[in-house]
Amino acid sequence: MCRLGSRREINHQFRNNVRSAAKFRSLFGIETAPHGDTLNYCFKRVNVEQAQEVICRMVEILIRTKALYPYRLFARYFMIAIDGTGILTFHERHCDHCLTRKLSNGSTLYYHPVLEAKLVTGNGFCFSVMSEFIENEDLNISKQDCELKAFYRLTQRLKARFPHLPVCLLLDGLFAGGPTFMLCKKNGWKYMISLTDNDLPSLNREFEAVAKLTPENRKHLKIELPDKQVKQSYRWVNDLYYKDSKSNEHLLHVLECLEQTTTINNQTTKTKFKWVTNFKLDEKRAITLANNGGRVRWKIENEGFNTQKNGGFELEHPYSENQNARKVFYLLIQIAHMIFQLIEKGSLFKKAFPKGVGSAKNMAKRFLEAWRNLRLEQIAFTNLGKGKFQIRFDTS
């Protein structure tokens, strides 16, 4: 939460501080903040599945209290983006579970990626729901673990943990294929999968052929903004036939959006978006699915991975050499990031700081200053969480 970035900083900032120690005594009944090495020793023995369940339970509470209802797609579906990212890289073998990659200079890179399922919303929320660590079982495997294998494990766990949740998966082109289509059909999930011109060639060819015969399936928009003008051209085709490599047959729908943005300085950029989906498309749905659905997938990259790597959470820092402790530290980052977002977009923070504090890093500094320097009697401190009050979230 304070974005200290290492176990050593825990010792420097929280230990040997009288007011910090008083808060630890009030909350946890211990003398002061645990030493960073104590945390590492403890996390070696913590059950990773139980740490994961804390995250699942937090998301479940947000859903059951209807805090996330305003951000659902078509007022029903919770959008879950699934994507992978690297968290640790080494030039020497770190452990028996490292993935390996040969570099162009002949050296070997050892790395640890993770596949994330994050609940994303149009207003910028990006909450981890479930994590699947991509790693080899041992040194003697014939084929390495990969994102696709991790995807099937992750979706199986996701369905078991949230069996009745109305889900719309937001995926990149890596997952565009028969197994994903079948999996979503079996689980009753909706999906929007990014589609490039090189993905599923037969489907792309059929889309182009049918689109020429259905000029009624088009829509043009012009959006005037203070600093730019945006033009969007939509095309869509329903019920395209596709047979996968295992001869399974699918009826798919494809949506394309060509966007041209012109700034006040007359600089123009053109972008092409295309998705394959199991949502039936029409004029109204096409625009909603593009702007409030498919394009929200980028939240996992920007508000998710980029914030955790470059915004002070130090996702790529090796908090521990122990495999089990490393995973627990990773999951704690997901918990901290979730709480941080809820505070940042919550009405209590807006009320306390109507002019803001400048940046998210400044928020973390405020947390650190308050924890180290705020003087409160123990009764007053423990009473902060009592009583009922309502927190509203920013929907912009």
Image: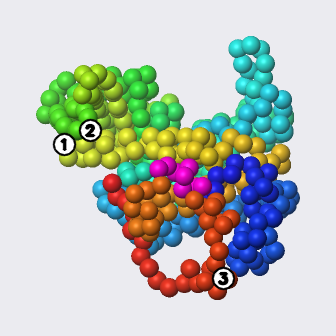
When asked about the image quadrant of residue 219, the answer is: top left
Residue 360 highlighted magenta (yes or no): yes
Left or right: 45 as drawn, with respect to 23: right
| Dot in front, 3 or 1 | 3
Q: Pointer 2: residues within 10 angstroms few (<14), some, or many (20+)?
A: many
Q: Pointer 1: residues within 10 angstroms few (<14), some, or many (20+)?
A: some
Q: Pointer 3: residues within 10 angstroms few (<14), some, or many (20+)?
A: few
* Residue 67 placement (x, y as % from top left): 42, 67
Residue under pointer 3:
377
Amino acid type, label 2:
Asn
* Residue 130 placement (x, y as % from top left): 59, 54
* Nearest to N terminus: mark 3 or mark 1: 1
Determine whether label 3 and label 2 are within 8 Å by CB. no
Secondary structure mainly formed by the magenta segment: helix
When asked about the image quadrant of residue 115, the answer is: top right
The residue lying toward the viewer, choosing from 184 and 165, is: 165
When asked about the image quadrant of residue 24, the answer is: bottom right
Residue under pointer 1:
283
- Tell me the residue at 69%/77% (across/down): 27
**Range of the magenta residues?**
358-365
Amino acid type, label 3:
Glu
- Tell me the residue at 47%/50% (across/down): 358
Tell me the number on the disc at residue 238: 2
